[in-house]
Image (cartoon, rainbow, N blue to C red):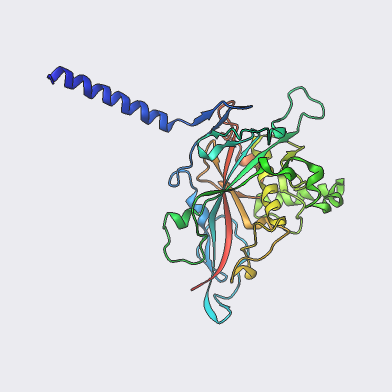
Amino acid sequence: MSRKNRLLTWICCALLFCSLSLAAASPAQASAGPGRCTGKFVNPITDICWSCLFPISIGGLKIWPSSRPDTSNPALPVCLCGLRPGIAMGFWEPVRLADVSMKPWCFVNLGGMKLDPGFDIGFKSMAGPSAVGGATQYNSQWHVHWYAYPLIYWMEIVADFLCLEQGSVDILYITEIDPLWQDSELTAIINPEAVLFANPLALAACAADCVAATAKLPTDELFWCAGCQGSMYPLNGNVSATIGHVQASRLALARFSYKLHRELVAWGTMGSKGLCGKYLMPVMRKQQYRFQATNPNPQTKGRYACAPIGASTTFMSAGQVYPAIGEDMGYLVWRKRNCCAL
């Protein structure tokens, strides 16, 4: 091969490599089915708010303090589970990843991949706020995909720590195949108490929860409130008070988390009761969770990078939604864990 031909070959290879790199770096998009799905894979290094791990405590003492609000921890530094003694530790752990989109079968955190199930299911929820006004002006319907995402465990950041959530990345729940998620009448099967809080007085109390969640932590006693986002009921993706994508998607995710607790799929991990293992929590304690945005724009720093349920979205909405190419939301779910460590 002549020198000229070798040079041309190298140039072609370089151009091909650049093209493949740009394609891999660009957010994946799908056009099959109603709506255009957008998103990108979550980078476990650069797209994670690692400061959200803190504070870390032993008993009531914070050995790694943080400016982020924390739940109450057991006062004593030692604990006992049966005959096994240990150290009472408290920390925040990234355990779940969630897609929240108005487009059915849109997997935002999987690179904006859109699946075709091969049958007509889940498309009832393809709706967003109307621009023509009227009763549907503030209505939106959302779907949620729930992933196992034990980030600290599978990255082996901390080894031989039995308190960590173990496993691998996996899809655990898809709301498109859940009839309770799309129909508010069927949802009443799991939240019959919703009729008790469908009144102006109960909704007015959510203003106090909004202030508490924004300043520090939400009020668990006001379990029917999702703070500044609105009412926690019904436990489905039908949001009748949509202000924006960030507010409505966070409300849908909070409702979904509560729904998992009500169905006894998700359990409690915080407080003294969680030292020796998970426990039933049919009425979700909102203080147990933090939500961090991963799509379309990861929030990796700042006071409200991983805000608690119900915190005002005024401080976290800027730059979080892009017209046409950034209207599908992705979140990393942080969970408080109290554990009697060896």
Residue 298 locus on image (x, y percent) = 52, 40
Q: Position of residue 274 (x, y in %)?
A: 61, 68
Residue shown at the point (41%, 32%) measured from the top left: 24
Q: Of all residues shown, which one is farthest toward the top?
A: 4
Q: Is residue 120 in view?
A: yes
Q: Horizontal placement of 60 versus 16: left or right? A: right
The quadrant in which residue 159 appears is bottom left
Rendered residue at 78%/29% (across/down): 136
- Count of numbered labels shown in the rendering: 0
Q: In which quarter of the image is the N terminus?
A: top left
Left/right of residue 89 with respect to residue 223 in the rendered view: left
Percent from the top left, x then y, of residue 10?
22, 24
Residue occupying image coordinates x 77% and y 41%: 183
Residue 310 appears in the picture as rendered: no
Looking at the picture, tell me which residue is in the foreground, 339 or 103.
103
State whether residue 46 is above or below residue 285.
Answer: above
Furthest residue toward bottom? 83
Judge left or right: residue 70 versus residue 238: left
Q: Which residue lies furthest to the front in this view?
A: 118
Residue 232 % position (x, y): 75, 48
